Image (cartoon, rainbow, N blue to C red):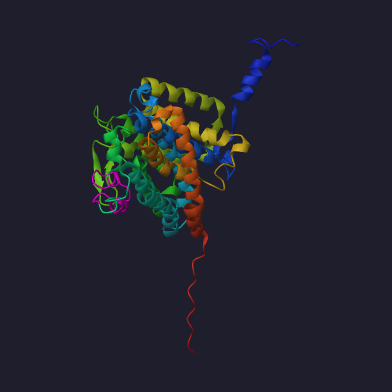
Amino acid sequence: MRAPPRPDHPGVAIRATVLLRPRGSLAELTHGRSNGFGALRLLLAAAVVVSHVFPIGWGHPDPLWLWSGRQTDLGKAAVLGFFALSGFMITESARRLPAGRYAWHRLLRIVPGLCGSLLFCAVVLMPALYRWQHGSLDGFWSRPDGPASYLTSLGSTSPNTGWDVSGVIAEGVRRGTNFDLSLNGALWSLKYELLCYLVAGVLAALGLLRRRPVVLLAALALWALIASGATDLPPGVPPAGGPGVALPAAGQLSAHLAANLGLAFLLGAALRLHAERIPVDDALALAAALTTAASLRWGGFAVLGQPALVYLLFWAAARLPQRYRAIGGRNDYSYGVYIYGFPVEQALALVGAARLGPLGFLACALAATAVLAALSWHVVEEPALRLRHRARPQPRPHPVSP
């Protein structure tokens, strides 16, 4: 039997060098559909579901919140990853398509699935829970905070329009079976995502996406603003609070969230524009992982850890084994997991699933969410996306008079 090589043996150094070496550029290793973006998006959506188990079922944030010194939790870190991946993929769409076509594609990706989720919650899930609580549907449809109010508010997280449907959530809080007042608290990020889409579309219309340094300089300027502490929140203020601006359709926008999510989006966009110069390097990925972990534990995540996490995500997209790269290629369930996970967990909490413990609760939540996400994709999202490829009708030529 051959003895294992000593640590100072040349073979060990050769193997370490092979493991930690540049693999090529980001453009080469994420070209076309040969990448892990679909798998990563699905993993990030599942991470959001994991994060929400704790506040919904037991009334406290997930463990990363305290471990990171209240810098972030698993769900918000996953949303940052979503925005970085979106910045990478949306930038190419904004550069390639005319402005109207770009806006149409973005709306088709977001709005039909969102409307399907709102309808399901308002006319299927909440009536079933109301009947379970009261024994009948008497009064459910006619209340001021009923399903009509929820649908017209588009599920916004306004205290008067989006937190509840006919008092179902409030009744669960009163009974002590759940600990979150919002029916679908995951929808808060959609208005920031649409804002980023708008920014990308404006930059493309102005021709600034073809000037590569512009996006990189914008990301550096936003990073400097965050590093200066200008977007920090006072102690005890939730991330959605603090200074911001109120928009007619989107409601209140938090400057803190807009800055951090905008930075993630711009970093993803900058990586797309400079992809042929970005090395996919195992040693850099190891350094990024250590930087992310250290900044989470000892501080500086927004300044140091967030850029490191973005690089780590794109390294993973380029380095995932081939068998995982088909995930999300034909059937993208990640958006459905994101928009259905929270109401599914609320429903489970209301019927007392917390007694199953965190793992049992999570298993039920992931199973039910996966079914709804698959239905959302095949029944709503994918048919809507087919409209992108329909040829626009050509105007009929007018007859020319002699």
Position in image of residue 10 (x %, y %)? 67, 14
Image vertical order of residue 204 relative to residue 350, above or below: below
Who is closer to the viewer here, 312 or 115? 115
Q: Which residue shows up at 47% across the image and 52% down it?
A: 381
Position in image of residue 351 (x %, y %)? 37, 37
Q: Which residue shows up at 47% across the image and 88% down it?
A: 401
Residue 313 among magenta residues: no
Residue 159 among magenta residues: yes
Q: Which residue shows up at 27% across the image and 33% down it?
A: 238
Position in image of residue 262 (x %, y %)? 36, 40
Q: Residue 187 is drawn in which quadrant?
A: top left
Position in image of residue 28 (x %, y %)? 59, 40
Chief secondary structure of the magenta portion: loop
Bounds of the magenta segment:
143-166
Quadrant assignment for the N terminus = top right
Who is closer to the viewer here, 292 or 175? 175
Q: Examine the rendering and report whether any part of residue 96 can be seen.
A: no
Outermost residue to the right: 1
Q: Is residue 246 left or right of residue 42?
A: left
Who is closer to the viewer here, 359 or 50? 359
